[in-house]
């Protein structure tokens, strides 16, 4: 799995590529948490567009980041949920907790201006 | 043509083997010409069962996980077996969102995902002896 970080207006954009399973979930968690600590920021956008696989370990890792970010007073949203992972996010009911957006621009707009989610699943 | 065939794979309970196990299951079922969604469902369900064996059955030691699969007609059946600690309360373990390890960011969705992504799920477990998860799925024949 590959993780790419981009900083946009004090919001950390995390682009995930490849397969997010138990093996990679722990590595992703450590990488994201240390990047947030290093930058001293607490809001996150996860771009899932490059994911080809995700199981419940990935769901757990995303929920864990969501809880952490909220506890620190930040916000977290998801964008570009690709077809191979949309079924598991639906079954897990992830959208009931974390807003989903079409792309990074819409997610960023929501976090900066409070615009409403373009899509809920 | 024979309508039944099987395979068996033994792996160590290391997290890097999760991807290996699900790719083998996907390759095995591919001869039934499954859709991308059916392949994805099977990979996810196998990944959940193998991850459970690694995290819960063997916890902090390395053990053996045996994955056996069968194709009978259009039905794919896979069994994921370990000789780990076993599950004391099966009913509780299968409840959505229940996890014995919340500190590890576990979602507690494993069995729910297996149930949703496969047609049938059976779990047999004996404390101290191990767990066997059996799942099956009908691969719908394509209209050609």
Image (cartoon, coloured by chain):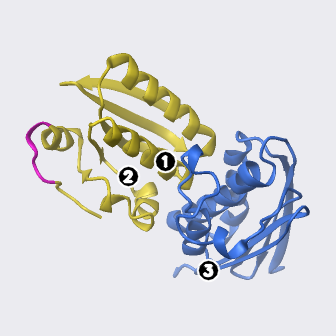
Chain colours: A yellow, B blue
Above or below: residue B55 compared with residue B98 = above
A114 in magenta? yes
Residue A52: mark: 1
Q: Pinpoint residue A15: horizontal percent, then vertical percent.
A: 37, 34
Chain letter behind tag 3 = B
Q: Pinpoint residue A25: horizontal percent, then vertical percent.
A: 55, 40
Q: Looking at the image, how many numbered discs can be counted on the residues?
A: 3
| Mark 2 and mark 1: Cα distance apart in space | 8 Å
For the residue labelled by badge 1, is the local secondary structure a helix, a strand or a loop? Answer: strand
The reply to whether discs 2 and 1 touch (Cβ–Cβ < 8 Å) is: yes
Chain letter behind tag 1 = A
A11 in magenta? no
Camera-nearest residue between A63 and B20: A63
Q: Which residues are magenta?
A: A112-116
Q: Pinpoint residue B103: horizontal percent, then vertical percent.
A: 57, 45
**Residue B112 as seen in the image, left or right of residue B132:** left
Q: Mark 2 sits on what residue?
A: A82
Q: Are labels 1 and 3 assigned to the same chain?
A: no
Q: Which residue is painted at 39% across and 64% down in the image?
A: A93
Camera-nearest residue between B55 and A70: A70
């Amino acid at each position: 799995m590959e993780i790419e970080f981009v900083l946009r207006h004090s919001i950390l954009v995390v682009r995930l590529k490849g397969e997010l399973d138990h093996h990679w979930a722990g590595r992703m968690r450590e990488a994201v948490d240390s990047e947030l600590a290093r930058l001293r920021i607490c809001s996150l956008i996860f771009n899932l567009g490059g994911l080809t696989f995700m199981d419940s370990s990935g769901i757990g890792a995303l929920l864990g980041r969501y809880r952490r970010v909220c506890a620190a007073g930040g916000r977290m949203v998801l964008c570009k949920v690709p077809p191979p992972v949309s079924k598991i996010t639906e079954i897990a009911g992830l959208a009931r907790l974390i807003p989903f957006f079409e792309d990074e621009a819409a997610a960023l707009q929501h976090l900066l201006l409070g615009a409403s989610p373009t899509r809920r699943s | 043509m024979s309508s039944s065939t099987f395979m068996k794979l033994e792996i160590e309970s290391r997290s890097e083997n999760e991807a290996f196990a699900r790719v083998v299951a996907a390759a095995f079922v591919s001869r039934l010409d499954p859709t991308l969604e059916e392949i994805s469902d099977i990979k996810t369900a196998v990944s959940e069962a193998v991850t459970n064996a690694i995290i819960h059955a063997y916890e902090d030691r390395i053990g053996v996980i045996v994955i056996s699969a069968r194709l009978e007609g259009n039905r794919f059946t896979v069994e994921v077996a370990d000789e780990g600690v076993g599950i004391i309360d099966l009913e509780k373990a299968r409840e959505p969102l229940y996890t014995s390890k919340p500190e590890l960011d576990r979602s507690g969705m494993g069995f729910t995902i297996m149930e949703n992504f496969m047609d049938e799920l059976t779990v047999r477990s004996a404390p101290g002896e191990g767990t066997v998860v059996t799942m099956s799925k009908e691969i719908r024949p394509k209209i050609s």
